[in-house]
Image (spheres, grey):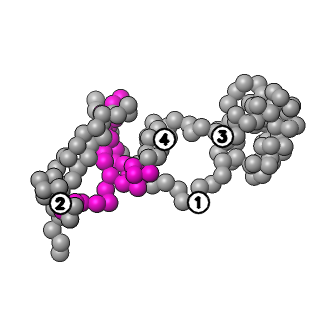
């Protein structure tokens, strides 16, 4: 059975969301020999707001999409709706029907009553209902890995 390498903190980077803690094998830290490097893990984020600790998967970190995922998965921030801005522009420039046609073209999974509710909300200056935004969103072919919480908020 292979022995796991001794690990240590290699770097701490301050970030708007907190501190990214990068760990690595002690042998790599001492020698910087790539052959001694541990791979396949990602950094940990210590949340600036509450001190909670979260693991950021390596692929998510390397693809530079971890911030949006963190805000969505951990803090519950609603993701940007790419259709809302186009629908709003069309409502004000070409009218409600043009906005509905555009929405139905880009989100055919919305029925007429749902598309109308979405467009009316945008026309009235509101965000469309979250359930309609979720329905209108194109499903991802390969959902991103989850960011996992290792320790909850510090009291």
Q: CA distance from mark 3 to mark 2?
A: 45 Å
- Dividing the picture into quadrants, the one containing residue 40 is bottom left
Q: Is residue 120 visible?
A: no
- Dividing the picture into quadrants, the one containing residue 75 is top left
| Residue designated by label 4 | 68
> Mark 4 or mark 2: which comes first in sequence?
2
> Mark 1 or mark 2: which comes first in sequence?
2
Query: Is there CB contact under 8 Å for labels 3 and 2?
Result: no
Residue in the foreground of this view, choosing between 61 and 135: 61
Q: CA distance from mark 1 to mark 2?
A: 37 Å
Magenta stretch in the rendered image? 36-63
Q: Quadrant of the C terminus?
A: top left
> Mark 3 or mark 2: which comes first in sequence?
2
> Mark 3 or mark 4: which comes first in sequence?
4
Residue at 13% x, 56% y is 31
Q: Which mark is residue 82?
A: 3
Residue at 31% x, 48% y is 43
Query: Is there CB contact under 8 Å for labels 1 and 3?
Result: no
- Dividing the picture into quadrants, the one containing residue 67 is top left
Q: Which mark is residue 141?
A: 1
Residue at 57% x, 39% y is 79
> Mark 1 or mark 3: which comes first in sequence?
3
Q: CA distance from mark 4 to mark 2?
A: 33 Å
């Amino acid at each position: 059975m292979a022995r796991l390498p001794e690990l240590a903190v290699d770097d701490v980077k301050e970030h708007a969301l907190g501190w990214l803690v990068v760990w690595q094998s002690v042998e790599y830290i001492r020698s910087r020999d790539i052959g001694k490097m541990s791979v396949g893990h990602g950094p940990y984020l210590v949340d600036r707001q509450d001190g909670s600790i979260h693991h950021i998967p390596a692929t998510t970190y390397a693809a530079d999409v971890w911030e949006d995922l963190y805000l969505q998965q951990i803090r519950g921030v609603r993701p940007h709706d790419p259709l809302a801005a186009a629908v709003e522009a069309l409502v004000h420039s070409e009218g409600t029907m043009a906005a509905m046609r555009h929405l139905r073209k880009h989100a055919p999974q919305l029925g007429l009553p749902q598309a109308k509710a979405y467009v009316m909300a945008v026309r009235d200056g509101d965000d469309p209902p979250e359930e309609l935004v979720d329905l209108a969103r194109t499903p991802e072919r390969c959902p991103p890995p989850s960011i996992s919480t290792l320790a909850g908020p510090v009291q």
